[in-house]
Amino acid sequence: MLGRVRRSPRLRRLAAALGAWYIRLVDRTTAWEIPDPALRDRIRAQQERIVIAIWHGRLLIIPAEMPPGGRVHAMISANRDGDIIADCVGRFGIASMRGSSRDPRKPLKRKGGAAAAAEAIELLGEYDRIAVALTPDGPRGPRMRAQPGVASVSAAMDVPVAPFAFSTSRGFVAGSWDSFFIPLPFGRGVKVWGPVIEPPADRSPEGIEAHRLHIEDVLTRITQDADRRMGRNPVEPAAPGAPR
């Protein structure tokens, strides 16, 4: 069935429409707690350039958090599954940068991750008010282990990083590499923004590596805190050095 959806443009559009409908259903029927509403309002006001960082497993609700009519771009994998996701988030006004990191198991297959990162840098250089959403561990992991891209883009363009995480009282963790969290409607939830991570003053490789580790640490901490607030066992990062 999934293969049939991937092959059919009509079914891909239907899947995207259903995905967008479900995200809106969950967002509108969940009693959300916002620990730092002032920071959330600042990011949604789009008065600055910012990189939004989300673990791959906590992507589902972020489209509903983006301001209507704002300038928001998100990195989406350049494959048929990515076509569905791009169509889905496009229904929230989010533009797509099509690319993903290269799969080390397929060294000859280029997926456009470098091109998408270059596009993110270009967009951040072109606009004074823009949000670029990136998954530091996407699209293949290891789970909750930041790859260099987000830190490098932040440092190159002198742009802060706004971590985001969410959890809900009703939902379940899928058995995927990223422990993708699927919330269910009509429960309680928490959306955690920040703290904002400023770009590093030290742009050396060592400074960017420290920035990467800081992003990883903050994102993991707020994601696990969100789970604890909802009475859930926190998802643990993959072991250091785990294969993708």
Image: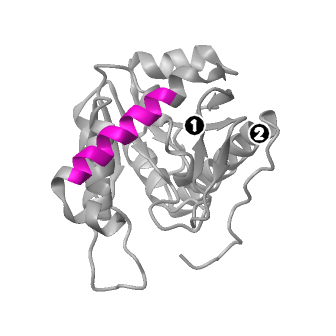
Residue under the point 25% across and 39% down: 123
Amino acid identity at mark 2:
Asp
Residue 186 is covered by the magenta coloring: no
Vertical position of residue 191 compared to residue 178: above or below = above
In the rendered picture of this protein, how many numbered marks are placed on residues? Answer: 2
Residue under the point 45% across and 35% down: 22
| Secondary structure of the residue carrying numbered label 2 | helix
Tag 2: Cα neighbours inside 10 Å, few (<14), some, or many (≥20)?
many
**Among all residues in the image, which is located at the extreme front?**
1
Question: Toward the viewer: 142 or 118?
Answer: 142
Please tell me in which quadrant of the rendered image residue 230 appears: top right
Q: Position of residue 159 (x, y in %)?
A: 43, 37
| Secondary structure of the residue carrying numbered label 1 | strand
Residue 32 in sight: yes
Residue under the point 28% across and 69% down: 111
Tag 1: Cα neighbours inside 10 Å, few (<14), some, or many (≥20)?
many
Residue 13 is covered by the magenta coloring: yes
Label at residue 164: 1
Label at residue 217: none
Label at residue 225: 2
Question: Toward the viewer: 202 or 210?
Answer: 210
User: Which segment is the magenta one?
Assistant: 11-25
Q: Position of residue 144 (x, y in %)?
A: 62, 58
Q: Is residue 4 left or right of residue 175?
A: left
Q: Please, what is the dominant secondary structure of the magenta stretch?
A: helix
Question: Toward the viewer: 224 or 127?
Answer: 224
